[in-house]
Image: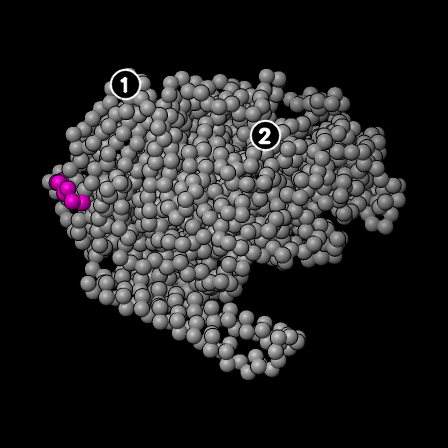
């Protein structure tokens, strides 16, 4: 009763405030003396008065928004302090559906009007900005033979082109070291990389004019651990005097298509922190010569890490040719949402086919190959153009230098400045001292000759990447990183990539989906472990109990950061390494996953104890069990079964989201007779189901109990399970099985109603408070969705399809997608067995096909869980030969050839279906979501793993689920894709209605998910972790739920990470942590009625000082993304502000 009274009083208060505010607005407008001055016609002064009035109204709306936000917080505090959560007791209606009564607490969706302006922006874009989307629409993609530069054109120059200003040439020696591809990381290190780095130290010291470039910190760190102090000092000197440059400085050179921005940032921080601590080096320039297409997310992250310039290489050959012809190979790369230039980074695009020596000195590979002195006659490799290099001597230097200078000059004509970059290297180059000698001594002879001839107007030398960029900025008269006069500005991305003909690298968006999924599971666990560990350490230190806490778990976090970082490598997450290398990555991923579960268990154990003094860490006897286990790196997880007996079992639930969440948590138990109680001992409503091992077989003595529970933001909840009957609260699911005439034995259980339908193909529906969902009685797949407040159904036809590969010599492989035409319908040998489960909190349809088990689940809950459909696809195509399995959704949405895919889970990029391009060119990466829309609706497919996606016709979305290919596609791997696993892909399907008048204008280069869509994605990617208290613990431990946040952050803020920083002893944490926040851009034009969850925005302001409950924020210091540069002095003021879309890092002390 007390709770009801409080809610009533507060509801009345809100109503009064709203009415009073409106009265004030009207009162101000009515009593305005200027209104009576003239009748009907509006002079200029009147218009300005009107504008003032409108501004005042806007101000009032803002004030109103703030008042309501304050009231909302008060109401939430009151409802939170009420005695225990009321049980949501569902009831069964006459028409045969379950109803869950609404919660007795209000939900708020209060968005500041100013926060809606961002997604409507974009009009501020300057006219000089080139959009990649427009470039692709306008290019002919005609692949004309360009002569010696096959994919380009003839380049000419005049004899006096450099009379006014010499050509300045920087030859940049580099060695591209893949942390795993043909060999494993360790094998590459042992056989090649360590020798490259050892030789580097001695060979660079022989001549101060020599330079070398290194990118992959993962290899460098391994080598550093194996060298003497003397050698370390020499390396620091080489870095200090500019002979050795570490470029980008990430743990790896990451894939930019499938990687998620959490992992991209994490591997960049790991690399930069290592470099700062061990070398005192801060990277200035980005170097990405091998990722298969390039994302603007990477450009943004490098800029925010304070890099000023970057280089990219693998871009579609037709786009390279266009940029070369328009002198646009060097440009300012700007983010699509940026209306000024705060995200600009100077970018150099390499013009030719590859980063190897034949394709870097100039347009003619036959000539450039003659200047790769590793290929001198008698060596292991030669020039495919049949003209070998010749050692440079007094006798031939004039002729050889003239030949090389001609290439330099031709290449230089493609650029706007007279400074030229010439990379000199390839994969695992410089691994023998002889190669160092051959390249450096022959080139030095060429340089000495060229530089001695003033009439050549050339200065050539070895340089690093930053030497090149610095010279360019100096020549063009700008500060490093600033836009040189006349240089173009560009927005957009460089997907999809083709290196020749119609060979599009769009297969790797899906290749080896099992490991793409495992990558994201590890990422979610790493984020959860970082946050819980940081909170546990801060609380333990504050209580003086840090001595009892396993601080050494920090070493496990470090190892997991490095494993996740390693897997972002452009041959790892891409699925483009040899089978043995994939297995090596898999073993590493699983080891780190198990370690992170330990870190989470240890932190949760400490934080959930009511009396911290009783905390005792015993690594041999963990307090909590894991939620699931994997028998092998290539096995799907097995959920932990909780054995019930006379004493209660406790379960600790971890919510890794920064928002409170209401979710259905499903646990496996040993008896169907189970009672579920809250931490206070109140009975909770639960749905009990059978656990199935196949379409028709139940698992004996294992049952699933599903409980809706509200969990605190980033916090821990507690449930207890007891053996016993509670017919009032524990409600069984009912099951129907459609056999379609197949003679199969179905197992039964007396506690669960089961109906078998031998034949019959009538369609059927499941429903919740938001929608009714229709399925085909024949296929068991989705057919349509009807919202409860609409008469009309929305078509939502789902089907499976199969792509073959070409019969010609070029076939699909790990990298390439080369289909033999349009996809054909998937035709199963037998009709599917369908199993329909219905219950109070969720209902689902499972369709069992030979190669795929498709689940569509509808949660009967208010809020995020109930507003979208949960889907999973368990795929097994190990008997396929050269086929790819796809899932396609057909709708009536009039998408007009446009669809939208995310880039790295960070931003959304509009796409156009281009008929002029082959089918495979229209596929794009989908790390977290893709959507189609029209004036009325938007349909978003959310995904928990990166896969390839397209929309080949209006109203369609399709995703490639798995691919099995029997041959290599001639890109160096030397294997097909034949090591397929049973893989489970997870999705959510969200249908949203556009509000009237919110149509997005055509030609927009930006698009944003709604706040609901953002939250749906986080629910899918950060599931609740259910950790049973180990059985051997003494009964009734004093466990208390843990609420780390004093208030929820605004719902457009995502707490990307809270990461303890390393102490001097690198196995322990320091007193400081890095807090990384992302303020998301969102579209307000999608309906937000009856959402059933709390959400307010604050125009980008957050008070960090009052964010954490029971902890003080000692100081806050804004820094660059990877903490290398302070952006302000440490301050006691803990109020921060972020612009939409920005990611910001803060160094802080919690305690």
Is 759 left or right of 1000, judged from the image as shown?
left
**Within the image, what quadrant is residue 429 found in?**
top right
Q: In this view, does 165 lie above or below 810?
A: below
Q: Is residue 26 magenta?
A: no
Q: In this view, does 432 lie above or below 744?
A: below
For the residues labelled 1 and 2, the Cα–Cα distance comes to 41 Å
Q: What element carries label 2?
A: helix
Residue positioned 38% across, 52% down in the render: 1091
Image quarter (top left, top right, bottom left or bottom right) of the C terminus: bottom left
Residue positioned 53% across, 31% down in the render: 508
Q: In this view, does 32 lie above or below 1049?
A: below
Residue positioned 71% across, 50% down in the render: 488
Q: Name the residue under label 1.
A: 744
- Foreground pick, 687 / 640: 687
Answer whether labels 1 and 2 touch (C-beta < 8 Å).
no
Q: Position of residue 1137 (x, y in %)?
A: 49, 63
Looking at the rendering, the stretch of residues picked out in magenta corresponds to 719-729
Residue 403 in view (yes/no): yes
- Foreground pick, 169 / 287: 287
Q: Does the magenta stretch include residue 726?
A: yes
Is 231 left or right of 987, judged from the image as shown?
right
- Foreground pick, 692 / 556: 692
Is 182 left or right of 863, judged from the image as shown?
right
């Amino acid at each position: 009763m007390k709770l009801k009274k409080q809610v009533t009083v507060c509801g009345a208060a809100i109503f009064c405030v709203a009415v009073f505010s409106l009265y004030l607005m009207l009162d101000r407008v009515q009593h305005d003396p200027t209104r009576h001055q003239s009748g009907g016609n509006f002079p200029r002064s009147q218009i300005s008065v009107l504008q003032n009035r409108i501004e005042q109204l806007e101000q009032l709306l803002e004030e109103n928004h703030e008042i309501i936000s304050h009231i909302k917080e008060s109401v939430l505090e009151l409802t939170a302090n009420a005695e225990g959560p009321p049980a949501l007791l569902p009831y069964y209606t006459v028409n045969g559906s379950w109803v869950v009564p609404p919660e007795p607490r209000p939900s708020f969706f209060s968005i500041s009007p100013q926060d809606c302006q961002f997604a409507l922006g974009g009009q501020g874009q300057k006219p000089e900005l080139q959009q990649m989307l427009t470039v692709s629409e306008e290019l002919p993609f005609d692949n004309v033979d360009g002569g010696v530069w096959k994919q380009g054109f003839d380049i000419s120059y005049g004899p006096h082109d450099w009379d006014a200003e010499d050509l300045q040439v920087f030859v940049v020696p580099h060695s591209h070291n893949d942390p795993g591809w043909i060999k494993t990381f360790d094998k590459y290190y042992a056989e090649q990389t360590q020798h490259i780095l050892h030789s580097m130290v001695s060979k660079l010291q022989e001549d101060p004019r020599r330079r070398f470039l290194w990118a992959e910190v993962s290899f460098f760190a391994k080598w550093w651990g194996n060298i003497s102090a003397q050698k370390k000092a020499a390396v620091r000197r080489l870095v200090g005097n500019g002979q050795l440059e570490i470029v980008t400085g990430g743990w790896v050179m990451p894939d930019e298509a499938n990687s998620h921005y959490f992992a991209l940032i994490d591997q960049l921080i790991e690399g930069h922190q290592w470099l700062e601590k061990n070398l005192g080096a801060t990277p200035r320039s980005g170097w990405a010569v091998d990722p298969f297409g390039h994302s603007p997310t990477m450009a943004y992250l490098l800029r925010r890490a304070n890099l000023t310039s970057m280089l990219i290489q693998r871009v579609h050959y037709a786009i390279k040719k266009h940029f070369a012809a328009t002198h646009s190979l060097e440009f300012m790369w700007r983010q699509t949402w940026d209306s000024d230039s705060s995200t600009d980074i100077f970018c150099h695009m390499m013009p030719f086919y590859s980063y190897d020596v034949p394709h870097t000195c100039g347009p003619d590979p036959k000539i450039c190959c003659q200047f790769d002195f590793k290929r001198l006659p008698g060596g292991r490799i030669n020039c495919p153009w049949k003209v070998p290099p010749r050692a440079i001597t007094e006798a031939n230097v004039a002729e050889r230098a003239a030949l090389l200078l001609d290439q330099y000059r031709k290449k230089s004509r493609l650029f706007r400045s007279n400074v030229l970059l010439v990379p000199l290297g390839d994969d695992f180059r410089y691994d023998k001292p002889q190669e160092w000698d051959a390249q450096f001594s022959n080139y030095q002879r060429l340089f000495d000759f060229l530089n001695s001839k003033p009439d050549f107007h050339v200065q050539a030398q070895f340089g690093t990447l930053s030497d090149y960029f610095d010279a360019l900025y100096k020549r063009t008269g700008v500060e490093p990183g600033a836009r040189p006069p006349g240089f173009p500005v560009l927005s957009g991305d460089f997907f999809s990539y083709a290196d020749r003909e119609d060979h599009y690298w769009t297969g790797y968006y899906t290749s080896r989906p099992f490991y793409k999924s495992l990558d994201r599971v590890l990422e979610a666990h790493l984020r959860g472990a970082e946050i819980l560990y940081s909170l546990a350490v801060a609380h333990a230190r504050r209580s003086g109990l840090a001595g009892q806490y396993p601080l050494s778990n920090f070493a496990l976090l470090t190892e997991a950061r490095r494993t996740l970082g390693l897997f972002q490598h452009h041959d790892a997450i891409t699925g483009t390494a040899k089978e043995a290398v994939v297995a090596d990555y898999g073993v590493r991923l699983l080891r780190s996953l198990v370690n992170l579960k330990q870190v989470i268990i240890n932190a949760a154990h400490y934080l959930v104890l009511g009396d911290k003094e009783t905390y005792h860490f015993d690594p041999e006897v963990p307090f909590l069990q894991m939620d699931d286990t994997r028998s092998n790196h290539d096995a799907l997880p097995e959920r932990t079964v909780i054995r019930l007996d006379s004493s209660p079992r406790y379960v600790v639930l971890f919510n890794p989201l920064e928002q409170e969440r209401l979710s259905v948590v499903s646990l496996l138990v040993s008896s169907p007779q189970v009672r579920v109680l809250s931490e206070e001992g109140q009975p909770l409503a639960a749905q009990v189901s059978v656990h199935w091992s196949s379409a028709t077989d139940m698992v004996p003595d294992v049952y699933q109990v599903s409980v809706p529970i509200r969990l605190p933001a980033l916090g821990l909840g507690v449930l207890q399970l007891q053996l016993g009957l509670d017919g009032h609260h524990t409600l069984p699911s009912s099951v129907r099985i459609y056999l379609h005439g197949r003679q199969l034995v179905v197992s039964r259980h007396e506690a669960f109603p089961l109906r078998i339908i031998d034949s019959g193909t009538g369609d059927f529906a499941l429903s919740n408070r938001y929608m009714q969902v229709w399925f085909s009685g024949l296929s068991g797949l989705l057919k349509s969705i009807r919202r409860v407040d609409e008469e009309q159904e929305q078509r939502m036809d789902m089907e499976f399809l199969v792509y073959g590969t070409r019969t010609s010599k070029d076939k699909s492989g790990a990298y390439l997608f080369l289909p033999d035409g349009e996809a054909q319908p998937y035709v199963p040998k037998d009709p599917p067995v369908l199993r329909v489960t219905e219950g109070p909190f969720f209902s689902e349809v499972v369709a069992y096909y030979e190669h795929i088990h498709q689940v569509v689940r509808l949660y009967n809950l208010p809020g995020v869980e109930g507003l979208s459909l949960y889907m999973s696809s368990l795929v097994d195509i190990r008997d396929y030969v050269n086929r790819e399995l796809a899932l396609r959704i057909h709708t009536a949405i009039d998408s007009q050839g446009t669809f939208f895919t995310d880039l790295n889970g960070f931003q959304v990029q509009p796409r156009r279906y281009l008929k002029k391009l082959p089918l495979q060119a229209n596929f794009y990466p989908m790390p977290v979501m893709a959507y189609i829309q029209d004036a009325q609706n938007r349909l978003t497919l959310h995904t928990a793993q990166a896969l390839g996606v397209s929309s080949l016709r209006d109203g369609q979305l399709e995703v490639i689920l798995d691919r099995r290919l029997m041959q290599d596609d001639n890109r160096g791997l030397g294997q097909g894709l034949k090591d397929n696993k049973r893989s489970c892909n997870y999705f959510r399907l969200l249908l949203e209605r556009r509000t009237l008048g919110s149509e997005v204008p055509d030609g927009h280069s930006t698009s944003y998910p709604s706040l609901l869509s953002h939250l749906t994605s986080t629910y899918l990617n950060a599931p609740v972790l259910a950790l049973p208290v180990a059985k051997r613990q003494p009964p009734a431990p004093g466990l208390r739920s843990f609420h780390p946040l004093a208030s929820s952050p605004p719902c457009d803020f995502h707490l990307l990470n809270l990461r303890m920083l390393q102490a001097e002893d690198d196995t322990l944490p320091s007193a400081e942590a890095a807090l990384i926040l992302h303020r998301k851009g969102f579209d307000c034009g999608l309906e937000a009625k009856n959402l059933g969850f709390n959400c307010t925005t604050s125009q980008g302001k957050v008070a960090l000082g009052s964010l954490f409950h029971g902890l003080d924020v000692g100081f806050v210091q804004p820094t660059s993304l990877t903490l290398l540069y302070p952006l302000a002095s440490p301050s006691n003021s803990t109020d921060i502000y972020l612009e939409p879309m920005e990611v910001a890092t803060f160094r802080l002390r919690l305690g």
